[in-house]
């Protein structure tokens, strides 16, 4: 009985994550973290060729991107869980 309810709730949450407004947030978060990973990898690959000032700017941009990613994922999680609790918590 408990496993069926868990699976049913999990499917409901997955449908909420796949709603168009939440899908846009999810894709934005994935795009931001992709850019951050590319920045970090490019710093590792071209470590000797990049000036220290450019390295600091790239690190700062990567850090800001990470903060934006966390904010987007936080908003996405809040929206999905709030809607789920509003629908099923009554």
Image (cartoon, rainbow, N blue to C red):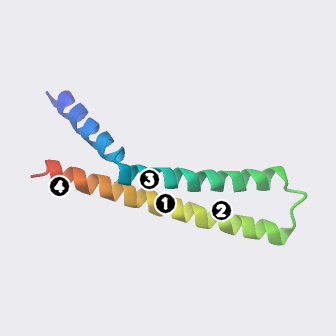
Residue at (33, 47) in percent of width and height: 19
Count residues near mark 2 (Cα–Cα under 10 Å), then give few for <14, some for 14-19, many for 20+: many
Q: Is residue 59 above or below residue 16?
A: below
Count residues near mark 3 (Cα–Cα under 10 Å), then give few for <14, some for 14-19, many for 20+: some
Q: Is residue 12 above or below residue 70?
A: above
Give the label on residue 24, or none.
Answer: 3
- In whole angstroms, how far apart are the C-alphas of marks 2 and 3? 21 Å
| Furthest residue toward left | 90
Count residues near mark 1 (Cα–Cα under 10 Å), then give few for <14, some for 14-19, many for 20+: some
Select label 2 or label 3 by which is in front.
3
Which mark sits nearer the N-terminus, 2 or 1? 2
Give the label on residue 86, or none.
Answer: 4
Which mark sits nearer the N-terminus, 2 or 3? 3
- CB contact under 8 Å: marks 2 and 1: no
Q: What residue would you read off at disc 1?
A: 70
Which mark sits nearer the N-terminus, 4 or 2? 2
Which mark sits nearer the N-terminus, 4 or 3? 3
Left or right: residue 37 compared with residue 86: right
- In whole angstroms, how far apart are the C-alphas of marks 1 and 4? 24 Å
Position of residue 39 measured from the top left corner of the image (x, y, whole percent): 71, 56
Examine the image and state in which quarter residue 57 appears. Answer: bottom right
Select label 1 or label 3 by which is in front.
3
Q: What residue would you read off at disc 2?
A: 62
């Amino acid at each position: 009985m408990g496993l069926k309810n868990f699976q049913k709730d999990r499917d409901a949450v997955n449908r909420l994550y796949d709603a168009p407004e939440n899908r846009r947030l999810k894709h934005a978060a994935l795009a931001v973290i992709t850019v951050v990973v590319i920045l970090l990898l490019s710093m590792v690959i071209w470590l000797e060729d990049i000036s220290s000032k450019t390295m600091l700017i790239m690190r700062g941009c990567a850090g800001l991107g990470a903060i934006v990613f966390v904010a987007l994922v936080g908003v996405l999680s809040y929206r999905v869980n709030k809607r789920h609790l509003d629908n099923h918590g009554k």
